[in-house]
Amino acid sequence: LRLADGPLPPTLVHGDLHAGNASARPDGGFAIFDWTDACVAHPLCDLLQVEFAEEASEKARLLDAYADGWGMDRAAMARLW
């Protein structure tokens, strides 16, 4: 499956998304900063850093959260990866 033929449209991606570019807010949300590498691209581009997650449970949690944001489950997201 070519990414361009899949169900996810090009979107704004951070380009350098990792824990060092995020901060928890007092209201329970997150602030994402350092958008210098942002561009319009395939949304899975920002998942590269998930591959570097040290613990399997952390990786699974990140994939679940990302997939949920696109209305998918982790298995469907993995088929695109």
Image (spheres, helix red, strand yellow):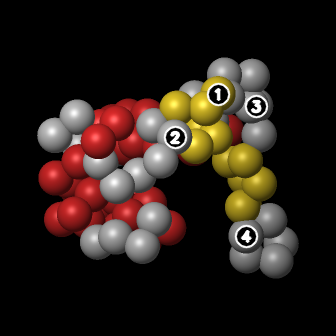
Marked residue nearer the N-terminal end (3 or 4): 4
* Image quarter in which the N terminus is found: top left
Q: Secondary structure at mark 1?
A: strand
Q: Answer few, some or many: residues within 10 Å of disc 1's Cα (few below 14, many 20 plus, some between 14 and 19).
A: few
Position of residue 56 relative to residue 33, above or below, is below
Which of discs 1 and 2 lies nearer the camera? The answer is 2
Name which residue type carries label 1.
Answer: Cys
Kind of residue indicated by mark 2: Pro
Question: Residue at image x 20%, y 54%?
Answer: 78
10 Å crowding of disc 2: few (<14), some (14-19), many (20+): some
Tag 1 residue: 39
Residue at the spot of label 4 = 29
Task: Give, as a three-letter code, the residue at label 3.
Answer: Asp
Mark 2 vs mark 3: give the one in front: 2
| Foreground of the two, 44 or 47 | 44
Vertical relation: 43 (above or below) 67: above
Q: Earlier in the sequence, mark 4 or mark 2?
A: 2
| Separation of residues labelled 1 and 4 (CA atoms) | 23 Å
